[in-house]
Image (cartoon, rainbow, N blue to C red):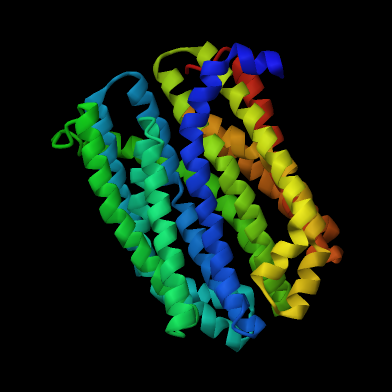
């Protein structure tokens, strides 16, 4: 390890300087989830916590499905950055923002059918659905800001400006947390207050991000007034790339949503307990995503520079640091997991049940490390079809297939399937990466 650290000292430093701000800002994202859960979890009844868990799960599904906007933007922009193509950098920004706006308006138009589907699939009781609908009907109108923010964040990552996403996520989440406490605790708006807090924070962040990107473009010598960006052919190419990443994201979110909806069918206490524990997983995912985001930018730039050697180096460095972070989080959850649960809720039955399933959360960081890091690698390479195919296989076999076999285990079966799914994602991406390397296709 010493030799590896010393030999590539400059590269380690470069990766961490890009990943560090993302890790710090990403930690505020699960902090937001922790605050939401803690504030609502102390209202005195499980149906409040279950309601916001259900409503926010559907919003998360929709917005994370739109995560293809950030991924495709980062990969394409990083490659254009490696080629020093300033015109393409401007064109990619405008095309991606146009696509983000169109997707957001579509989500708003479909909001009522989506709420009906949420009620049908969850089979939750009336009290839980009332809270879930209250949250969803407000939060869905933040879609234009939230989706455009994904594009702007991806563009900044692509040009290796790690501090930009740091500022953006920090402002979004701190604003959200402050408003969350004010609306829910002081104004007593309940679940609706948490939704309004998120909506306002998203639009404040959008205004800030647009200003930041405009300033960054000037420094990079990128003329955002370029007029040749609205090319139908290039828009279709962008849609094609995003289509495959969308399918990949859909399969991923179906697995997470299945946990929420199936947990609701077991009972509101199980749904609430899983909501608490999923905050642990989100903490892990966003921390590892800090390294993965840096990997996207570094691998994409190396591909733009036509350097297979540099691609391999950044992959190895990313896996090294990802592994260290995974071990760290497993240790934290082992030592302090029960204490964290008690911070999130004071409902006795939820605490008791969440503690039963805590061991699954302890082993998840190690099982999931590979999938997060290789996602970053494949985004940088813009190999969306590989991401789609490995995700579909892992979801069908590693999650739904295994859950069908162990469904009698009820909630333990859900957590077993989720752990297996995350492990299989990493393994299938690793096998695919090795095949690409062996066939000398890294620069294709």
Quadrant of the frame with the N terminus: top right
Q: Residue farthest to the bottom?
A: 126
Q: Is residue 30 left or right of residue 161?
A: right
The x and y percentages for residue 145 are: 32, 58
| Callout count | 0
> For the point 85% across and 58% down, which residue is it?
406
Q: Is residue 172 left or right of residue 442?
A: left
Residue 186 higher or lower than 398, as above or below: below
| Whether residue 233 can be seen here | no
Q: In this view, does 256 lie to the left or right of 400?
A: left
Residue 276 higher or lower than 314, as above or below: below
Q: In which quarter of the image is residue 320?
A: top right
Residue 76 higher or lower than 330, as above or below: above
The x and y percentages for residue 242 are: 42, 42
> For the point 61% across and 79% down, which residue is it?
42
Residue 144 higher or lower than 118, as above or below: above
As rendered, which of 270 and 365 lies closer to the eye?
Answer: 365
> For the point 37% across and 57% down, which residue is it?
146
Q: In this view, does 284 lie to the left or right of 304?
A: right
The x and y percentages for residue 333 are: 74, 53
> For the point 66% across and 38% down, which residue is it?
325
The x and y percentages for residue 115 are: 48, 75
| Whether residue 102 can be seen here | yes
């Amino acid at each position: 390890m010493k030799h590896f650290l010393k030999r590539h000292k400059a590269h380690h430093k470069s990766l961490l300087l890009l990943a560090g701000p993302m890790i710090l800002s990403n930690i505020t994202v699960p902090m937001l989830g922790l605050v939401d859960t803690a504030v609502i979890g102390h209202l005195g009844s499980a149906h409040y916590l279950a309601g916001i868990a259900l409503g926010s799960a559907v919003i998360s599904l929709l917005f994370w499905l739109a995560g293809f906007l950030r991924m495709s933007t980062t990969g394409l922009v990083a490659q254009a950055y490696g080629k020093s193509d300033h015109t393409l950098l401007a064109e990619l920004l405008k095309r991606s923002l146009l696509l983000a706006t169109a997707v957001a308006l579509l989500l708003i138009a479909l909001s009522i059918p989506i709420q009906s589907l949420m009620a049908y699939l969850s089979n939750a009781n009336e009290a839980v659905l009332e809270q879930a609908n209250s949250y969803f009907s407000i939060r869905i109108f933040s879609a234009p800001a939230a989706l455009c923010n994904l594009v702007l964040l991806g563009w900044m990552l692509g040009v290796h400006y790690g501090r930009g996403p740091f500022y953006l996520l920090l402002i979004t989440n701190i604003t959200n947390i402050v408003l969350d406490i004010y609306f829910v605790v002081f104004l007593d708006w309940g679940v609706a207050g948490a939704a309004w807090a998120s909506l306002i924070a998203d639009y404040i962040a959008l205004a800030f991000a647009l200003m930041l990107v405009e300033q960054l473009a000037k420094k990079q010598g990128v003329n955002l007034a370029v007029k040749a960006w609205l090319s139908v052919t290039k828009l279709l190419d962008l849609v094609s790339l995003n289509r495959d990443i969308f399918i990949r994201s859909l399969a991923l979110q179906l697995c997470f949503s299945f946990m929420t909806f199936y947990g609701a069918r077991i009972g509101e206490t199980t749904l609430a307990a899983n909501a608490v524990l999923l905050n642990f997983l989100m903490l892990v995912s966003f921390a590892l995503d800090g390294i993965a985001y840096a990997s996207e930018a570094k691998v994409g730039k190396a591909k733009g520079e036509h350097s297979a050697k540099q691609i391999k180096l950044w992959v190895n460095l990313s896996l090294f640091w990802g592994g260290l972070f995974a071990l760290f989080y497993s240790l934290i959850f082992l030592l302090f997991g029960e204490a964290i649960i008690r911070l999130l809720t004071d409902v006795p039955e939820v605490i008791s049940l969440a503690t039963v399933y805590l061991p699954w959360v302890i082993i998840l960081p190690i099982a999931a490390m590979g999938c997060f890091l290789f996602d970053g690698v494949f985004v940088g390479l813009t190999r969306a079809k590989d991401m789609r195919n490995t995700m579909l296989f892992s979801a069908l076999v590693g999650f739904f297939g295994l859950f069908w076999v162990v469904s009698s285990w009820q909630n333990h079966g859900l957590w077993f399937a989720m752990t297996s799914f995350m492990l299989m994602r990493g393994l299938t991406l690793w096998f695919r990466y090795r095949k690409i390397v062996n066939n000398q296709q890294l620069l294709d």
